[in-house]
Image (cartoon, helix red, strand yellow):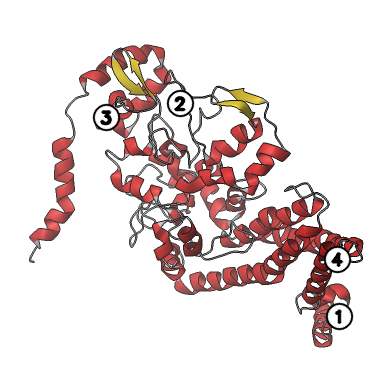
Amino acid sequence: MKINLFVVLFIFFPLLVQAKTTPNSFSRETKKCVTCHKKTSPSIYQMWGNSKHYRAKVGCYECHKAEATDKDMFLHHGKRIAVITSPKDCAKCHSQEVKEFSESHHAMAANIIGSLDNVLAEVVEGNRAFVTPAFPHGNSAAAVMGCWQCHGSEVKVLKDGKLDPATWPNTGIGRINPDGSKGSCTACHARHEFSVKQARTPETCGRCHMGPDHPQMEIYNESKHGIAYNANKEKMNLGSSKWIPGEDYSAAPTCATCHMSGTKDLPVTHDIGLRISWNNRPPVSVRPEISDAKMGLPGGNIKWPVRRKMMKSVCLSCHNTNYVENFYVQYDGLIELYNEKFAKPGLRLYKLAVPLKKRKAKFADKLDFIWFEIWHHEGRRMRHGASMQGPDFTHWHGSYEVAKHFYSSFIPYLEKMVEQNIKSKDAKKAKAAKALKTEIDKVLNHKNHRWFIGKQDKKEAAKRKKAAEDFKKRYK
């Protein structure tokens, strides 16, 4: 058998370089750190001692060393030290992982600071009573302790090199670090052990991906995947260096399995959106390359069919082709239902109603809360539930809630706004009310909504009646 020398070098040269550059002992600086911190911070010392960093002779100084120009640098026993170990620091050894992460939605997570969610946390829920040196005019404790802890914030450095308490501690996944880098590797690889085993557990992702608007953790626990994982944790081999489904484990997938980890056909990736074929975050679900392009991410050039093919490759590690293909038919059907029946008409109606609000500020009118919860809470649960095979979240916590509030709260409130303004002396309001009424009539006379105004198609009504009679016969 002939061996291609180039292939051999391509595969093994990185290992040879690593072997050559891996130090034989800890640096003099790290040894000095350990002498003291072994006594003052024994828990941190022990966690580091359990890590692969310890075995690779990577120590305190290698990660916390600072340059004279670093904003968060301070002198500690004659050495320049920074408290924060940023992705830029990690990239000295993990350049590929940091590159992939920096091109992902995770790295952009702090963008929430300018979103509707933060208006809620800063204004509606909060105030400016939380005053710190970096925020002399105050900030909202609800935003600091809530939104920022998952999404991240800009870490502010004070004159003495210390970090402002409004922005530190903070391991938000999109944290903006003093060196300009985005992200926090310790959001998933908790310091100081930086365990890959911990990063692969669903509970790590569940720290942020849970709750009323993005309950991925709860959905996972309800799904067959989550049930299998919880029943077979001891078989998951979570600490394996390779961790390929079908080789190192087969009991169940975790979040990491589907979105990040390697398979027999795919490499590991730290771009968690690379295998997603719908972005279900906005009011109307869009293809992920659209949202990536808006953020200026390289993913804007990776079309959704390519991403879906990658995810299908993961699914095929355990399921057959027919199972996987049929799942995606079901999933796409649910997204189309949500988009066409509720999201698109709902968004049109909301925009037409905005000029008729009594109070113009965001969330100062009941309309804002009704529409926000339909798409941001209930609509997301409906879509996320379908994407992760959680039927209860798809239906009872999802589509039922969407429909209930669309018909019992949203439409009646819009009709009330029309009634109050269509004869207004204010010409602009009267015009806006007329336009809104026209759109309400158009929406409710669509085949998706005719039932609500008693205009259900006669053939459809007959089919429903027959189905009910057949049901009674079947279960008599």
Q: CA distance from mark 2 to mark 3?
A: 26 Å
In the rendered view, tell whether residue 119 sits above or below residue 295: above
Question: Which quadrant would the N terminus be assigned to in this image?
Answer: bottom left
**Comparing labels 4 and 2, the label whose residue is closer to the camera:** 4
Q: Are marks 2 and 3 in contact (CB under 8 Å)?
A: no
Work out whether residue 409 or residue 20 is closer to the camera in this orientation and state it: 409
Q: Which residue is mark 4?
A: 430
Query: Which numbered mark, 1 or 4, is in the foreground of this view?
Result: 4
**Nearest-to-viewer mark from 3 and 4:** 4
Q: Which mark is residue 58?
A: 3
The residue positioned 81% from the left and 80% from the top of the image is 464
Q: Is residue 358 visible?
A: yes
- Judging by the rendered image, the residue that carries numbered circle 1 is 455
Q: Nearer the viewer, mark 1 or mark 2?
A: 2
Of residues 225 and 136, the one nearer the viewer is 136
Which amino acid, by three-letter code, is at mark 1?
A: Lys
